[in-house]
Image (spheres, rainbow, N blue to C red):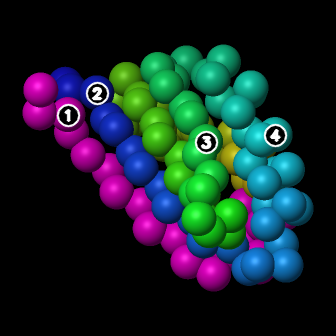
């Protein structure tokens, strides 16, 4: 099976940028240690600091599903769900 790429674009409330960014940074180290995590990178838009993008690569959809059930991911969701204005998630298969 092909590896799974995921791009999540998260737009947060302007007044919550630093709080959400702090919570996102907390995800990085434990997630990169997870089984099946190949790449897990956080980006912040240069022109709109309220826009963040996670670029992720996983060995399989099952590995991503496992990630979404971890304590650190659930803690992030609980801490930020009311601070997010928009979430777009694209699950993709690399062509070449």
* Structural distance between the alpha carbons of marks 2 and 4: 25 Å
Give the foreground label among 3 and 1: 3
Badge 3 vs badge 1, beta-carbon distance below 8 Å: no
Left or right of 15 in this view: 11: left
Q: Residue 42 shows which numbered tag? A: 3
Crowdedness of circle 1 by 10 Å Cα count: few (<14), some, many (20+)? few
> Residue, x 55% and y 32% (percent of image)?
40
Give the foreground label among 4 and 3: 3
Crowdedness of circle 3 by 10 Å Cα count: few (<14), some, many (20+)? some
Give the foreground label among 2 and 4: 4
* Structural distance between the alpha carbons of marks 1 and 4: 27 Å
In the picture of the structure, the residue carrying the numbered disc 2 is 3
Up the image or down, 48 lies above or below 7; here it is below
Using the image as rendered, state which of residue 37 and residue 61 is in the foreground: 37
Element under disc 3: strand
Q: Earlier in the sequence, mark 1 or mark 4?
A: 4
**Which span of residues is magenta-colored?**
77-96
* Structural distance between the alpha carbons of marks 3 and 1: 19 Å
Badge 1 vs badge 2, beta-carbon distance below 8 Å: yes
* Structural distance between the alpha carbons of marks 4 and 3: 11 Å
Q: Earlier in the sequence, mark 2 or mark 4?
A: 2
Q: Residue 26 shows which numbered tag? A: 4
Q: Residue 94 shows which numbered tag? A: 1
* Structural distance between the alpha carbons of marks 1 and 2: 7 Å
Number of labels in the image equals 4
Give the foreground label among 1 and 2: 1
């Amino acid at each position: 099976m092909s590896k799974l790429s995921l791009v999540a674009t998260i737009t947060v409330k302007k007044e919550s940028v630093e709080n959400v960014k702090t919570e996102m940074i907390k995800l990085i180290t434990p997630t990169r240690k997870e089984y099946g995590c190949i790449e897990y990178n956080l980006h912040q838009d240069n022109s709109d600091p309220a826009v963040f993008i996670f670029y992720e690569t996983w060995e399989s959809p099952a590995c991503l599903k496992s990630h979404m059930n971890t304590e650190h991911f659930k803690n992030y969701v609980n801490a930020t769900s009311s601070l997010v204005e928009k979430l777009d998630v694209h699950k993709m298969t690399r062509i070449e």
